Image (cartoon, grey):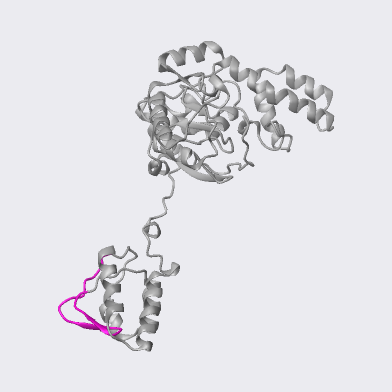
Amino acid sequence: MQSQEVSGSRFQVLGFSIRTVILFSRPETRTRLQDRHPIPVIRSLSRFSGRLLKPGFLILFLLAMFSCPESTAARSQKTNFVNTLMSPNTKMTAAADKKVVVPAPFYDALRKALKKRKTTVDKICPGADPVARRILEEYGAIFLADKKVLPPPACVFTNEDQVTAFQAAAGFVVETIADADIELQPQAMKALLKAREKAQKEALDITPRGGAEAARRNYEDSMRLWDTRFLPALDYWLGQGRLSEDQVSRLKGLPLHEQIAEVLELEKAGIFFSKDLSKSILYSIAAPGTSQHIAMLALDVTEFDNPRVRELLAEHGWFQTVLSDLPHFTYLGLKEKDLPKHGLKSVVVDGQTFWIPNVENEISPAPSAYR
């Protein structure tokens, strides 16, 4: 909306005279002002918009009001007027003027991003494969990353040779951080080091949680970590009588892809496989061949609970994108304000903001600090 300047003649406003007034407010505030301060004020405050008062004018305006000779009643009237302007209900702040950004649909944004990379959604995650599509909707933020990095060619790698070939094509660099050799794609590492340098200037640090495994992983690593959740959960649910010995034996013998599918089905019945057995295993550890660490665009951060550290990482393109996995950060190389138009929505868990694919029927688990 356009603001209106009232000029050309003097107006009496609560005991003092002004020639020009530029004020901004919301329609509901205009109504309130009209009720409290009739004709003279309304003539000078003729149009309002929702924008912030110009600071220089506001200072002069208030000084003029309170420097004029006046009766006690007049000063009381002025005080009420100023309180109306500055009250929380008036919302005269820059933040209040920000428009709520509606995130783009994830699949629309993904199709556009993949088209630029000359591939399609069905090529990276076949629609007929429910496991692949579930992985995409949980971990898919990585496929929206900046063009300077290379996302995986598929949602699920099925063997070590595929992972090795991809990591060679993407390339990676090594840096020693807190006595651990960290391997990431070059652009991701560059951004991390800049964020860390800035953190150290503020007497903070950004370090890997869990040593070298906090960054690049191979296929065998993802298999081993899967078993650290899968096998103990089988024993627990067997002891609880929720699974039989035959079921446990069958699950252990299934081909990996079928095993993952069976686990996800059991979780629909409340038989969870995360470390604390309270939520999906996907919020505790990635299924084999699906981890963002394989793409060398993820880092588990020791200082994840420090708000300033999270802020510095976000300033350099690193965001939390796996719902409930608190230490896990993903390099997207994008500005936070642009994430909604890339099909990501913000979800707050335990006071921390996660940027996840904007798809329907998402699951919102309890927070966990463990992978």
**Left or right: 301 as drawn, with respect to 369:** left
Instruction: Quarter of the image for the C terminus: give it.
Output: top right
Q: Residue 273, how many percent across, how many down?
A: 70, 31
Q: Is residue 116 above or below residue 72?
A: above
Q: Residue 55, how many percent across, how many down?
A: 29, 63
**Left or right: 98 as drawn, with respect to 154:** left
**Left or right: 283 as drawn, with respect to 199:** right
> Given the current orientation, which residue lies at the most extreme top position?
161
Q: Is residue 302 above or below residue 22?
A: above
What kind of secondary structure does the magenta stretch mostly adopt? loop
Q: Nearer the viewer, residue 88 or 63?
A: 63
Q: Is residue 310 above or below residue 192?
A: below
Residue 42 found in image quarter: bottom left
Residue 49 found in image quarter: bottom left
Q: Is residue 314 above or below residue 5?
A: above
Residue 104 on the magenta segment: no
Q: Residue 359, how many percent across, how many down?
A: 52, 41
| Highlighted range, magenta | 1-20
Instruction: Quarter of the image for the N terminus: give it.
Output: bottom left
